[in-house]
Image (cartoon, rainbow, N blue to C red):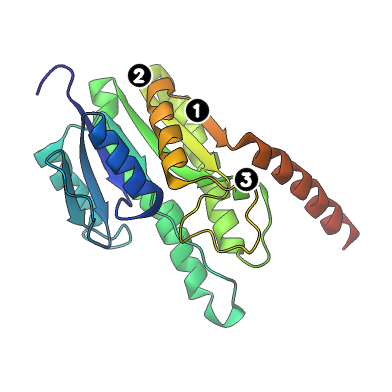
Amino acid sequence: MAVDERRVLIVGSSDGIGLAVARRLVSHDWLASGSSRSPSPLVDPHYQHVIADVSSAEYPAQVQTLVYERGPFDACIYCAGIGSSFDVAHIEADERVFTVNLTGALRTAREILPLMVTAGRGHLIVLSSQADELVLTNAPSYSASKAAMSAYFEGIGLALRPKGVAVTNLRFGFVDTKMARARYKPFCLTVDKAAKIVERCLATRPLRCTRPRRMAALVRLLRWLQRWRVRMT
């Protein structure tokens, strides 16, 4: 492997932010491996894609194979994520949201982080959400799973920093993807802008990155209103 050769694994790379990140990084000379439940439209000699479901029994072995064949990875970016509207008759849909958003990230970290710690270097980025501060009555599993993701990965980020491994909790607001179904989407980012932010995090290695900042101010206001509502109920 060349001295300046950088390798990255992108989980959830067939569309949305993950696809935009893959395109951006391979254009900047990263060797990228991607995985998702669907084929990727990206065709590039510096990119390899595998079909993998983060909730499947085979997923850990698939990550191990990618590490063996394409690693070791300097960075891993977990972009997989889903949301579901609350329906009391179908709470199993909320269970899947937790499985993909939180458990899938944990299963990825289980395979990637020990190798990075052994090497004394590496970077894991997880895509959380500014919704981690809110209580969403229409999609409680989404905000709750992102809240757990943020708390857990910031915790292990602090634990692993002295070992030379960075963990970044990247908290976006609205990004123009199929996930953004709200009628009103203030300060919505394009996927290309989101990909630029991901690349910047790879360079700066922050524990937490929240973008856009104007959305964060709005979320703080909404959080205060929600807490007032809870107290008054």
Lower sequence index among marks 3 and 2: 2
Viewport quadrant of the C terminus: bottom right
Circle 2 residue: 164
Where does residue 185 sit, x and y in percent of width and height? 62, 55
Circle 1 residue: 207
Q: Is residue 99 above or below residue 120?
A: below
Task: Assign a secondary structure to mark 1.
Answer: loop
Q: Residues within 10 Å of mark 3 (few under 14, many from 20)?
A: some
Identify which amino acid the numbered label 1 is placed on: Leu
Where does residue 15 sit, x and y in percent of width and height? 34, 55
On the picture, is 5 further left or further right than 112? left
Task: Assign a secondary structure to mark 2.
Answer: loop
Depth-wise, is mark 1 or mark 3 nearer the camera? Answer: 3
On the picture, is 103 further left or further right than 3? right
Lower sequence index among marks 1 and 3: 3
- Please identify the quarter of the rendering in which residue 33 is found: top left
Q: Residue at x 53, y 79 (%)?
A: 90
Depth-wise, is mark 3 or mark 2 nearer the camera? Answer: 3
Q: Residue at x 42, y 31 (%)?
A: 167
Viewport quadrant of the N terminus: top left
Identify which amino acid the numbered label 3 is placed on: Phe
Lower sequence index among marks 2 and 1: 2
Circle 3 residue: 187
Q: Is residue 106 above or below residue 86?
A: above
Whether residue 155 appears in this view of the structure is yes
Identify which amino acid the numbered label 2 is placed on: Gly
Could you tell me how far apart the alpha carbons at marks 2 and 1 are, in whole angstroms? 13 Å
- Depth check: give the residue in front, 182 or 37: 182
Where does residue 28 sit, x and y in percent of width and height? 26, 29
Could you tell me how far apart the alpha carbons at marks 1 and 3 are, in whole angstroms? 23 Å
Task: Assign a secondary structure to mark 3.
Answer: loop
